[in-house]
Image (cartoon, rainbow, N blue to C red):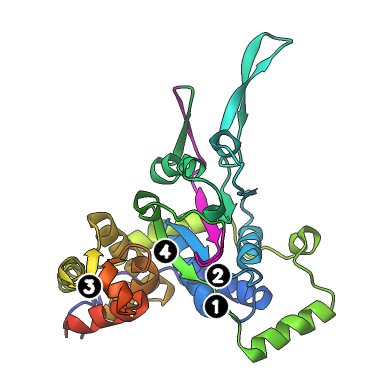
Amino acid sequence: MRPYSNPYLPLLMPELRAELNRLSEALNRVVVGQSQLVQQLLVAMLAGGHVILEGVPGTGKTLLVKVMAQLIQAEFRRVQLTPDVLPADITGTNILDLNSRSFTLKKGPVFTEVLLADEINRTPPKTQAALLEAMAEQQVTLDGESLPLPELFWAIATQNPLEFEGTYPLPEAQLDRFLFKLTVEYPDRQHEKQMLLNSQKGFQSRRLDIAQIEPVANVKLVLQARQKVKSVQVAELIVDYLLALVQRSRQHPDLTLGASPRCAVAWLQTSQAAAWLAGRNYVTPDDVKAVAPPLLRHRLILKPESLLDGIQIETLINNLLNQVPVPR
């Protein structure tokens, strides 16, 4: 028996996990060629963390989020962010009603269950910061009044790579609020051919076609699954291994900024979610490793000289994982 497993723990609910597997399969049927991305998105959803999707235009970022919301029957709102979008356009504002001579609250799109902030790096920092309280506290303050957001509230932001002109890089404080940064790659030739065949059969990523997709889960089920994830066992051996990785990132000679305490907690939670999705009631070192790239790629900051040497953050994360001995 492995030192981080416990055969006496109760088995996880197989029917609940089967529902999540059906969700994964349904997503992969619509958004073809992105199976790893879909799996990582499900891990983030179960861990209750917000996500950045980064990729070049036309790779299906927006479609993926729309389909996910439809499949879990969640209330969905989309904000197309541009340089002229104001914070009040996100959170809402109090409007004077001339008939009643009183102010009426008009809630913004942030009051929803799944929020898609499209092209978040094309809007100025002031508007980007409007999402900060909502993401951190799951509430919005308008004119001194705190208004709670729905229990599920899940923000997914898309952005184009920073090489494109007219973008505003997210500040570190805002980046750290996002659990994962997921990279949307081009699909391979086989999957891109499948996309063309789907298009030939008539499927388009329009609202009408997405609304016809049959849901396979619901918000209540997702919230139940989140509670089950919290019961996944994490042995002290695994906690020590995770802490060793965190400490190593802070001491790495090529990094200006390593993993924060918030990052360490998120690492633990996402490892539990990955283990639960795999059908286990305990976390293994492989779970810790699997969630490391999407968890760390937007949190670790390379030194300027390391950037000049051409060091890539993905390579550094892999080296970091190889430098710390895996518990046996």
- Which quadrant would the N terminus be assigned to in this image? bottom left
SS for tag 3?
loop
Q: Earlier in the sequence, mark 4 or mark 2?
A: 2
Q: Earlier in the sequence, mark 2 or mark 1?
A: 2
Question: Which residue is under mark 1?
Answer: 185
Estimate how packed mark 3 is, as few (under 14), some (14 to 19) or many (20 or more) residues with alpha carbons within 10 Å.
many
Q: Residue sitting at 50 percent across and 52 percent down?
A: 154
The amino acid marked with disc number 1 is Glu
Give the residue furthest to the bottom.
190
Q: Residue sitting at 23 percent across and 75 percent down?
A: 6
Q: Earlier in the sequence, mark 4 or mark 1?
A: 4
Q: Disc number at residue 254?
A: 3
Q: Earlier in the sequence, mark 4 or mark 3?
A: 4
Q: How many marks?
A: 4
The amino acid marked with disc number 2 is Gly
Q: Which residues are magenta?
A: 144-165
Estimate how packed mark 4 is, as few (under 14), some (14 to 19) or many (20 or more) residues with alpha carbons within 10 Å.
many
Q: 146 or 118, which lies in front?
A: 118
Q: Residue sitting at 43 percent across and 53 percent down?
A: 170
Question: Which residue is under mark 4?
Answer: 180
Point out residue 293 in the picture as x, y percentages from the top left corner: 37, 73
Q: CA distance from mark 2 to mark 3?
A: 26 Å
